[in-house]
Amino acid sequence: MSDTALETLLRRDRAIVAGALITVTLASWLYILWLASAMDMAGTGAAAGATATGSGMSMEGMDMPMDMPMDMPMNGGEGATMAADARAWTLVTFAYAFVMWAVMMVGMMVPSATPMILLYARVGRQAAQQGKPFAATGFFACGYLAAWTVFALVAAFLQWLLDRALLLTPALSSASQLLSGVALIAIGLFQWTPLKDRCLSQCQSPLIFIQNHGGFRREAGAAFSLGIRHGLYCVGCCWALMALLFVGGVMNVLWIAAIAIFVLAEKVVPGGRFLSRFAGAALVVAGFWQLAVMI
């Protein structure tokens, strides 16, 4: 095969992989937008219903669960117990939360993983042309997403714990200024830790990562395992940033987009390490401000 034909094939191969990544990302974001819109409509409907009740009280600005009866007594321990019962989760509820987090992680993390996946596809195609094929790129990509799927499971469990403790509003944001302040400080400090440095360095240099972890793999299972390892480094780098969603709102599209863009910038911008430390300092200041206004 001529060099020109090989280059054409390689470009086509990268285009196919890039197209698949774009399709998956767009589908994830369409789901996120649809879910955010549905939640917003549900909240608006609940507020309108509250205004129409005989008490004449509006839910605007209240942290009351949307499915809570409007005549529920809210005084004392009985009110708190009934509020917790109103937020009781079922297996189906947990499954919905898990799917929401899993799809959200795909939409947020696939763009930042694209350089690594495209590199894997390009080198894999070259190896195939030389008669030494690697495992398909899909195994590596699925391994990467598997790591974030496990994170989604943990995030759904944390959402359940916070909801049971009545620390989340119906919009799935923090209902406690103290919790928000402490979370912002902790997340900001994490951006300065050696663990953040190590994990981010593994994500910033795709080729070096692969070389340092045994190179490209011929077996599907080994490629899947390599993808999981890369995904775990990304989880280690970004888990704290994802926790910001509990502060600003799990389904707040602007927060989701801002975090996704920041994660991408950390990995591809030359000054990504400075960027993460600057953001960490800003988060710490924001956290102390949250605590200060409580006094």
Image (cartoon, rainbow, N blue to C red):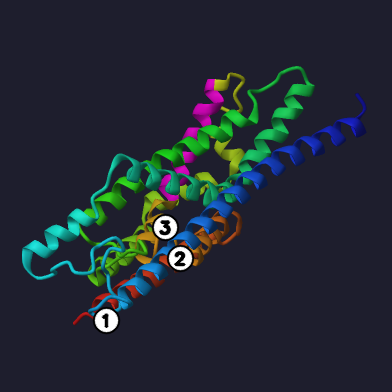
Left or right: 195 in relation to 38? left
**For the residues bearing labels 2 and 3, Cβ distance under 8 angstroms:** no
Left or right: 183 in relation to 85? right
For the record, the magenta segment spans 221-237
Predominant secondary structure, magenta span:
helix
Where is residue 280? Give x, y as percent: 40, 65
Where disc 3 sits, the SS reads helix
Q: Which residue is mark 1?
A: 56
Where is residue 67? Give x, y as percent: 29, 60
Where disc 2 sits, the SS reads helix
Tell me, yes or no, whether the highlighted magenta stretch contains residue 274.
no
Which of discs 1 and 3 lies nearer the camera? The answer is: 1
The numbered disc on residue 41 is 2
Compared to residue 57, the image places residue 114 above or below, namely above
Q: Which residue is mark 3?
A: 241
Determine the residue positioned at 40% across, 59% down. Answer: 250
